[in-house]
Amino acid sequence: MNHIDARLAELGIDLPTAMAPVANYLPYVVTGDLVVVSGQLPAMNGKVAVVGKVGTDVSVEQGQHAARLCFTNVLTHLRAACGGDLGRVKRVVRLGGFIASPPEFTEHAAVMNGASDLAVAVFGEAGRHARSTIGVPALPLGAAVEVEGLFEIG
Amino acid sequence: MNHIDARLAELGIDLPTAMAPVANYLPYVVTGDLVVVSGQLPAMNGKVAVVGKVGTDVSVEQGQHAARLCFTNVLTHLRAACGGDLGRVKRVVRLGGFIASPPEFTEHAAVMNGASDLAVAVFGEAGRHARSTIGVPALPLGAAVEVEGLFEIG
Amino acid sequence: MNHIDARLAELGIDLPTAMAPVANYLPYVVTGDLVVVSGQLPAMNGKVAVVGKVGTDVSVEQGQHAARLCFTNVLTHLRAACGGDLGRVKRVVRLGGFIASPPEFTEHAAVMNGASDLAVAVFGEAGRHARSTIGVPALPLGAAVEVEGLFEIG
């Protein structure tokens, strides 16, 4: 067991089984020493678990939980990209966060912290990343949050 | 004629003449072996051909057509980035899809398949890519869809 | 003083003091010869200076000013990424622009030019970049515009 798998166990996190891409694309592509992970929905057991708009049907806390769930799905694909060894991750380079929410919502950053905090909890200093977070009117399948990732591996 | 141009001919696809960027930026930048292509609108003959919101004025099928059209514009610029030789494309790394649509719309992934399916039809295995698709309230010039791309070339 | 700092002085631009990230992430990450700068808000003196939706409470001109302000914040972080020496910037590779605006707005590109024009004014030919611009219903802290950047450094 590498140190990242040990850390996941310590945090009580079981990475979800990968949800099949909802269309004709791949969950990740490796180019050079970069891994690009496709936008992930808050999926559990192959279904989107958090549906709706943050700020109306979904609370900020539920949104954070959704962002965290998105990131566990990102990790599932990142692990596959690393041939099963998350110890090869050198750096979380960038996360992109999309928060389905109404025009008057302003707490997108707090929601996205559900993903960012988990990245730092799992990878430590190497988990600190650049980030862009925006509101969107809606996401595929009605998901409340979507998170994409860019990673450097060795 | 390289094998990609042959494949385009086989698919009956004439790449559109590049639409001038609608503002002060370039259609693509090459850095290392990566090509970053700017967000492309569904343009034909220098004009945006599919305007409106998918799910209200524009059907999912028309949205797919728009996404396909966006991707042909991406290809036009990618070809220029390759000095005219699309055979140099090693990998479609990532596509980003932006679907102008109302808050209740959920079929963004189906719309974006218009671009993804064409990427795979043109480049085969090398055309399979990572992808993020989101809804947006509106796009430049009222376009229904916008697609950006990241490519690895040799 | 390197030629870029000289150019900034010539343009009368004082880069803003960095606003602390509004959450658990970094303002930039360097990977290889690329710098990824997190999405920046139109901040001045540590506060978001342009709040609201472009096209309703905020004019296109004010939106351009906001985009320009976002880009000065991008530059502040880029300079730190370069160890203080903006002369190391080889290329502005890509800017991403997010314009908080209503569904009927169509002038996103004009707004984003506030950032793009400044990039070219500061870096000359090396400042010409790929770009994706989209509308969004809302941004963190109610900001009118957000700009992210990707740069090549030497």
Image: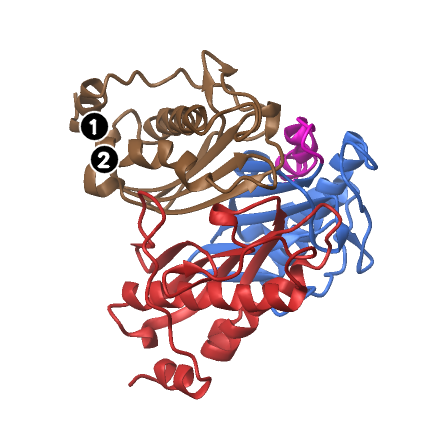
Chain colours: A brown, B blue, C red
Q: From this viewpoint, is residue C118 visible?
A: yes
Q: CA distance from mark 2 to mark 1?
A: 7 Å
The residue carrying mark 2 is A123
Q: Magenta segment: does it hold B112?
A: yes
- The quadrant where residue C20 appears: bottom left
Instruction: From the viewer's perspective, tell me whether residue C24 is left or right of residue B54.
Output: left
Secondary structure of residue under mark 2:
helix
In this rendering, the answer to whether C6 lies above or below C89 is below
Q: Residue at x 42, y 84 (%)?
A: C7
Kindly identify the amino acid type of the residue bearing the numbered disc 1: Ile
Q: Magenta segment: does it hold B68?
A: no
Q: Which mark is residue A4?
A: 1
Q: Are marks 2 and 1 in contact (CB under 8 Å)?
A: yes
Q: Residue at x 52, y 49 (%)?
A: C142
| Chain letter behind tag 1 | A
Outermost residue on the top side: it is: A45
